[in-house]
Image: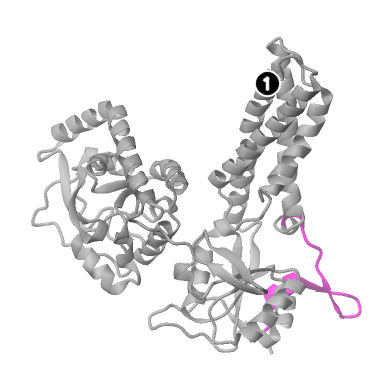
Amino acid sequence: MAIRNPDVEAAAVLPTNNGKPRAKKKTFAERARTDPLSTIITVSIDAVAASVATILGAWWSVRAGAVSPPLWVHLLFPPLLIVLLALRKAYRRPLNRRFLDEIEPIETSIALACMLLLSDMILDGALSHPGRVLVRLWVCASLLLPAGRLIRIVIQRSLRRRGILVSPILIVGNGHVAGQVISRLESSPEYGLVPVGIVDAEPWFGKPGDPKPVVPHLGSPADFDEIIRQTAVEGIVIAFSRTSDEVLTRVIRSANLNGLRVWVVPRMFDTTGAKVRVEHVGGLPLVTLSHTDPRGWQFTVKHVFDRVVSALLLLLISPVFVTLVVLVKCTSPGPVFFRQPRVGRDGRVFGCLKFRTMREPDESSDKFEPKVGSAPGGVEGFDRRTTIGKVLRATSLDELPQFVNVLRGEMSLVGPRPERPEFVDLFEAQIRRYGERHRVRAGVTGWAQVHGLRGQTSIDDRAEWDNYYIENWSLSLDLKILALTIPAVLRRAE
């Protein structure tokens, strides 16, 4: 029988006069995090933004001396745009809604809607210059719709960090992977999922050294219906378990019947990227795994792009670069640049360039050893930063000379951050799949860094993010990381 959790159960059900439990009426916040209200809110925001865009576009046309678009354009544009966005699956509820992921389907749908209306207006012959009217509508919509989505995302993340708009879920499974899922969700409130219990036929088991999750074990899959009634959860995650697939299938079907969202950690999750496809042989599903070839022509394009952009950036920031050279040279004795051996692609060691931010070590400087499981970085041991060095590190301006490394072909703009040879040997012995990050060139910025893994943070998490980047690489992903680097740099670092 399931272990009862009085606090959770009391929040889930209320007693009636005859003693039988009845469902507690959901608050607006509880309904807003689930469909259909969650999707209705997003559609409403888009509809309002599209309607305002048509009004502003018409006002702009009149102000410019042009004729206002016909009434049918005002009436047709918002619903047409909503339909196109729905066809682009823009109203799915992703776990972690990112603004950069919203832009492409929104802008594409706006452009297509304007093209369809323009074609209709040309055929109708109502206006002599319909293109001028539609361009103004397109500009207004291209600004207002992303702005509406951005406001929604910012509010949603803020509420989730405060424990509002979060969904309680169950972890069906046990062991290391289940613990990893719990740890990720607890440390990442932006996903909006809070594990409230583990469901498995066995008590907790894991690898030696794995911390036992604080989430309670509520019972076995046989008690699943009773557990979800007690906990009022809104979703489940199927992690690894010794339970048979037949039993887990019944759990998933029961979850579906109770309206719960279901996520499954695939057995070969290390090889399952974002580009997997599901095909069928008769009724049997086959998962097609994508493959990234770091020696293929796509990475040749990436490296050419890296060098061209680095050359342009060095040209643009040359006044800042020269100013920093003078400041470093004049404020403390020693060389301007600091060259440190780092491990790059295929394990080759190169000299990674930075502006010098520290004084030479002396006898009082202690030897630095990273914490177990953490990467080196930031202030290591005794603080030897110079005055200008503190500013450079806090703003990440000390990394600018690495654009020279990119020009030399030793680094890329985006990729796993390079590490020192002595730590690489240590981490390869300790961290699973750590060495696989050396399949590509090291980067000035990376997927792990834009997710807050800078300085002395978990090396296990870094390896996971870096390998995800390699397996799912695309030029658009590089551009997204470069865009995310801007707010990441604005956050203070050591």
Quarter of the image where one finds residue 258: bottom right
Q: Nearer the viewer, residue 252 or 476?
A: 476
* Most distant residue in the left direction: 363
The answer to whether residue 394 is magenta is no
Q: Which residues are magenta?
A: 4-29
User: Total of numbered circles in the picture?
Assistant: 1
Question: Where residue 88 sits in the image (x, y, percent)?
Answer: 66, 48
Question: Where residue 186 sits in the image (x, y, percent)?
Answer: 52, 65
Amino acid type at image mark 1: Gly
Q: Nearer the viewer, residue 37 or 110?
A: 110
Which residue is at 31% across, 47% downward?
412
Q: Is residue 369 visible?
A: no
Q: Is residue 305 left or right of residue 344?
A: right
Which quadrant holds the N terminus? bottom right
Which residue is at 35% across, 60% downward?
457
Which residue is at 23% across, 32% downward?
324
Dot 1 falls on a residue whose secondary structure is: helix
Q: Residues within 10 Å of mark 1 (few under 14, many from 20)?
A: some
The answer to whether residue 20 is magenta is yes
* Most distant residue in the front direction: 282
The residue beneath circle 1 is 131
Q: Nearer the viewer, residue 297 or 61?
A: 297
Quarter of the image where one finds residue 4: bottom right
Q: Is residue 66 left or right of residue 431?
A: right
Q: Is residue 249 visible?
A: yes
Which residue is at 59% across, 45% downward?
102
Question: Where residue 47 sits in the image (x, y, percent)?
Answer: 75, 38
Is 284 drawn above or below residue 38 in the view shown? below
Is 367 drawn above or below residue 411 in the view shown? below
Is 210 drawn above or below residue 220 in the view shown? above
